[in-house]
Amino acid sequence: MRTTASLICFVLILLSISQSVLGDQWGKFEGKPNFDWLEDGRRMILKEDFNYELPVKDSETGKAIIWTSPAGTVVDGASIPQPLWSFVGSPFAGKFRNASIIHDHQCEQKMHPWRFVHEVFYWGCLAEGVEPKKALAMYTAIMIFGPKWTVDHELIESKLSLEQKKEEYKRIKKEIEMGEPSIKEVDRHLEEILRLPSRHYNFHDQSTMVEKVEGNVIINHRRE
């Protein structure tokens, strides 16, 4: 009996360690969001700052990069494209809620490159334990349907019709479900579909430098 209890305790410790490592690998959220629902029942307002520590560090200071959705931020899930809702459910439910809160605010502020913001949403989903294929499908939908903007914070109009977007999303989503594509491979498809230039930086490789924009200054960061 004592042996069984010890074994169970050991397994629980291993699970705790693995979850901690997973969270550190993809960043981590600080606590749980504290919010109130607004009268329309569709939006919520944050009562306290909500932070996400990204899995990258400033290469100059060595400090962790933290994105904050400040108290008073109104979140309505708008950055999660509506065609995705039928696949994942409400933007405020499930393991991706925290990532949605950070993503909504970043899409509103437009202070970072849109491709980086959308990929950080993917990291946040993985940090919360979203199944990798589901996280990749959500990332694909946000890349196709989600907002895009210039360095001057101007929205970029898509050249694809809504029906074209839906068809392309269904095609890539099926490839994700049937195989094991990496985010790099999905990005190559998206670059072709959305007519995007190939990245000259790499957010995916933990050993390479990545870039983010802070105002008009490009700063390098390294994945740990």
Image (spheres, grey):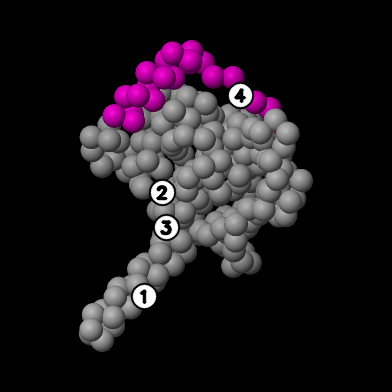
Magenta stretch: includes residue 154: yes
Task: Give SS at disc 3.
Answer: loop
**Residue to which mark 3 is pinned:** 206
Q: Are marks 4 and 2 in contact (CB under 8 Å)?
A: no
Task: Give SS at disc 2.
Answer: loop
Q: Position of residue 138 (x, y in %)?
A: 43, 36
Q: Amino acid at mark 4?
A: Ile
Q: Earlier in the sequence, mark 1 or mark 2?
A: 1
Q: CA distance from mark 2 to mark 3?
A: 20 Å
The label number, if any, that marks residue 130 in the structure image: 2
Q: CA distance from mark 3 to mark 4?
A: 29 Å
Q: Residues in magenta?
A: 153-174
**Residue to which mark 4 is pinned:** 156
**Image position of 58 (left or right of 208):** right
Q: Residues within 10 Å of mark 2 (few under 14, many from 20)?
A: some
Q: Position of residue 42 (x, y in %)?
A: 64, 32
**Residue to which mark 1 is pinned:** 13
Task: Give SS at disc 4.
Answer: loop
Q: Earlier in the sequence, mark 3 or mark 4?
A: 4
Q: Are marks 3 and 4 in contact (CB under 8 Å)?
A: no
Identify the residue shown where x is 41% and y is 31%: 87
Q: CA distance from mark 1 to mark 2?
A: 21 Å
Q: CA distance from mark 3 to mark 1?
A: 27 Å
**Image position of 100 (left or right of 45):** left
Q: Position of residue 194 (x, y in %)?
A: 45, 24
Identify the residue shown where x is 52% and y is 26%: 82
Q: Earlier in the sequence, mark 4 or mark 1?
A: 1
